[in-house]
Image (cartoon, grey):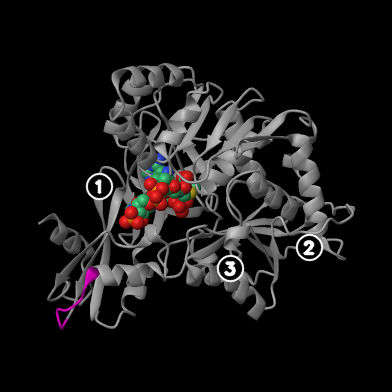
Amino acid sequence: MLEIISNAISYTNKKAIISNGVDYSYAQLLEASEQFASLLLETDADLHEARIGFMVDPGFDYVKVQWAIWRAGGITVPMCLTHPLPSLQYVIEDTEASIIVVSPQYEALLKDLTAEKNIRLIVLGDENNVAPKTLPDIDAKRSAMILYTSGTTNKPKGVVTTHENLEAQISTLVKAWEWSQNDHTICVLPLHHVHGIVNVVSSSLWSGAVCEFINGFSAEHIFQLFQKGAINVFMAVPTIYFKLITYWESLTEAQQQSMTECMSKFRLMVCGSAALPVSVMERWKNISGHVLLERYGMTEIGMAISNPYHEERRAGYIGKPLEGVDVKLVNEEYHEVKPGESGEILVRGKNVFKEYWRKPEATAKEFTADGWFKTGDVAIVEDGYYRIMGRNSVDIIKSGGYKISALEIEEELRKYELITDCAVVGIPNDEWGELIVSAIVDKDENINTDELNKWLREKMAAYKTPRKYLIVDELPRNAMGKVTKNDVKKLFES
Ligand code: MCA
Ligand code: AMP
């Protein structure tokens, strides 16, 4: 039996989830996911790794559907709730999803597409009651989840993780950060990425803890829930801590004091997905009394490096390799660097994903001959602590904790009639980490960038669209004619 399910059986009467103000026990989660698994199966005994897309709001229903897919032998394909139709269609077509499950408000968006492609569409709330079936026994080596991640190719790739990968990723964190049944966390992150799915929801439910949900980010709502006094574990990206600090600063002195007091009782506060600026870490310590625990991860590997739970959490560093995760730094020839030298982070272990979905060449390219995964991130080790120095590719941007491919945005922009050429880069920004910006060549000089952005938002998620445009006569290029992205960044400095 899958470990997350057998664990849940041992907590049956405990509270598992709070969503929309309603409490749900582990027993309810087990029963509802068994029932839904039976519905997914219809007359089959096993979904045999069919890809099941789902677009379900964070909360009890999300976990019910996720566990049901796993228990019925399918692969979960969580879809982003804010993606426009073309991005969703890409995921649905690429995975060849055979069933799509949606919260009612997403039905209209996907109805025509699913009908046209003959995909079974299940709208939550409309499902018929079916008799519980005997569920298949799932081998941990089977594929469990596909998440889409942007990389150095223009279209996002599906990252396939097995149950064994997920179990390794979760159990390592549960041990390192000492999750227990007494914990109560809140999920404020989107649930189509590892941070929310593995670090928050799965780790808490694996441990018998309570996972509370809010739908969409709101600093005010988060602080209101903190003040109830039950939440003791919090995880977020640097942008969220930045936004919480800004909100806290807008409160009266009495409100600030009361917030500070309630946060001082927390057990743990973690930050990751992008570099945590030392200034944010220090301001948060003044506000909450907590030294944020910064850790480093990636969709393909879950978490790999983390500051310690008990020992020093060093500002500006991502910490030390987690138990069960092998890490080394290498030079361009993939030879290990000397101590004190910087190199690309390579990772090996049960946490490392199985493959990019139906992309054997891309998969092979990202691994060394002896099985180490190439992260593309460059780091250095100082006193045993890893520090991120940068990334191998300028075409990868991290904004608000989201990984975004400059190439994907450029490809879309070039389809806009009035654009002759363009170059997308990320420029440093205190709040977002990096801000996406684009230089565009507009021969006729009549591009209205508001119109352009409106057009782009119909094609891709709002968080992927440039915040600023600069119209230029030509893009900076080197002698070979290649656009020099560092010079494009400089254009925005001036
Ligand atoms: C939203 N906006 C952005 C971004 N996101 N602008 C720049 N960069 C972004 N990433 C813009 C919207 O377009 C909108 O602009 C305005 O901000 C408000 O949008 P809204 O959606 O309301 O934003 P928000 O709700 O304030 O969201 C901010 C957020 C969100 C909560 C920080 O970006 C977020 O949830 N980020 C977390 C992503 C995450 O989970 N990453 C983990 C990946 P306008 O008003 O003009 O429309 S997993 C990972 O990285 C690995 C495994 C790891 O290590 O964890
Ligand atoms: P994703 O593919 O969305 O999972 O993003 C993974 C990337 O996020 C990594 O390759 C890093 O570049 C970045 N990242 C995650 N955590 C950190 C961190 N603590 N500091 C700096 N970069 C990070």
Circle on res. 47: 2
Query: Label 3's element?
Result: helix
Q: State the residue in front, 491 or 247.
A: 247
User: Which residue position is annotated with label 3?
Assistant: 108
Left or right, 493 with reference to 211: left
Query: In x, y percent, where is residue 124?
Result: 69, 56
Region in magenta: 443-449
Query: In x, y percent, where is residue 418?
Result: 24, 81
Marks 1 and 2: CB-CB under 8 Å? no
Left or right, 292 with reference to 121: left
- Mark 3 or 2: in front is 3
Circle on res. 429: 1
Mark 2 residue's CB less than 8 Å from ligand 1? no
Q: Which residue occupies 32% across, 74% down?
A: 413
- Tag 2: amino acid: Leu
- Tag 1: amino acid: Asn
Residue 24 visible within the image: yes
Which image quarter holds the N terminus?
Answer: top right
Q: Which residue occupies 31% across, 79% down?
A: 416
Query: In x, y percent, where is residue 318?
Result: 40, 36
